[in-house]
């Protein structure tokens, strides 16, 4: 390496340009740490080389860069360069946070503003009445099975919606029965997809048992359903 005042100053400047250039790149924390380590090690190696190059001038009694004043200037330049590089690397670590895309606050799911009676009647009554007739006997064609699958899916997903309409009391029991109804309805829906009438009917009746249990606890035993 050519040891002149201009060469070591250029070397330090080049290292600083690397640090600031890196600060403009979107990087993660691990990359920033590796970059910092690399820059600092490189600066230290070049600083040691500079001292070695200036040593002959000092031994020869040179009054320029080989003197203790010249060596002190090299140290001061190294320290200043190190400080600026660290400032640049701090900016590098903060940059991803500043440029990160803000995560929008999720909009809460709020049920339609209506009472429980209107919800039950609007969501469950019509599918239940159609299924009571459709599952009285084994369906004869694909059209009948398609209608059954549709109504079973409505009842199963409707049971999920009950979780948005918790009562003031016994919420744990409400959730338990809602989940049980959903699970039975889902089994009936899957059986209907396979056109397995026996399993469809069995799971459908199990779902009604959970519905009736819920009505006993939360509706004073009213609206008991029959398959």
Image (cartoon, rainbow, N blue to C red):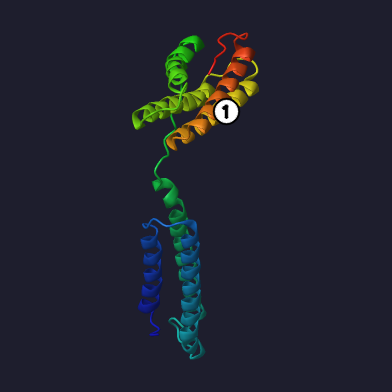
Quick check: 98 above or below 7? above
Task: Name the residue at 64% across, 23% down.
Answer: 172
Work out whether residue 82 or residue 93 is closer to the camera in this orientation and state it.
Answer: 93
In the rendered image, residue 143, in percent from the top left (x then y), is placed at 34, 29
Task: Identify the element where label 1 is drawn.
Answer: helix
x and y, in percent, of residue 166 in the image: 56, 19
Position in image of residue 75 (x %, y %): 50, 72
Q: Residue at x 62, y 10 (%)?
A: 221
Which quadrant holds residue 102?
top left
Quadrant of the frame with the N terminus: bottom left
The total number of labels drawn is 1
Residue located 36% across and 30% down the image: 141
Q: Which x, y percent locates residue 92?
A: 43, 56
Q: Which residue is mark 1?
A: 179
Residue 112 visible here: no
Up-down: is 25 above or below 57? Answer: above
Left or right, 163 with respect to 6, comes to right
Taking depth in this image into account, of 188 and 183 the one nearest to the observer is 188
Q: Which of the pair 42/193 is nearer the observer?
A: 193
Q: Residues within 10 Å of mark 1 (few under 14, many from 20)?
A: some
Q: Is residue 137 visible?
A: yes
Splitting the image into 4 quarters, where does residue 12 fall? bottom left
For the residue pair 77 and 152, the one nearer the viewer reads as 152
């Amino acid at each position: 390496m050519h040891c002149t005042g201009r060469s070591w100053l250029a070397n330090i400047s080049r290292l600083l340009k690397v640090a600031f250039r890196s600060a403009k790149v979107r990087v993660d924390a691990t990359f920033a740490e590796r970059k910092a380590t690399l820059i600092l090690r490189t600066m230290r190696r070049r600083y040691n080389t500079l001292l070695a190059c200036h040593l002959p001038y000092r031994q020869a009694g040179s009054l320029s860069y080989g003197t203790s004043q010249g060596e002190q200037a090299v140290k001061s330049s190294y320290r200043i360069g190190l400080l600026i590089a660290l400032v640049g690397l701090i900016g590098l670590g903060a940059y991803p946070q500043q440029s990160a895309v803000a995560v929008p606050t999720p909009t809460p799911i709020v049920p339609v503003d209506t009472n429980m009676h209107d919800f039950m009647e609007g969501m469950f009554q019509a599918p239940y009445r159609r299924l009571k007739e459709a599952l009285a006997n084994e369906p004869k064609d694909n059209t009948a099975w398609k209608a059954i699958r549709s109504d079973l899916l409505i009842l199963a997903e409707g049971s999920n919606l009950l979780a948005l309409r918790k009562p003031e009391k016994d919420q744990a029991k409400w959730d338990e029965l809602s989940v049980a109804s959903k699970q039975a309805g889902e089994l009936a829906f899957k059986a209907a997809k396979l056109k397995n009438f026996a399993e469809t009917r069995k799971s459908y009746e199990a779902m009604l048992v959970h519905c009736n249990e819920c009505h006993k606890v939360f509706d004073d035993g009213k609206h008991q359903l029959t398959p």
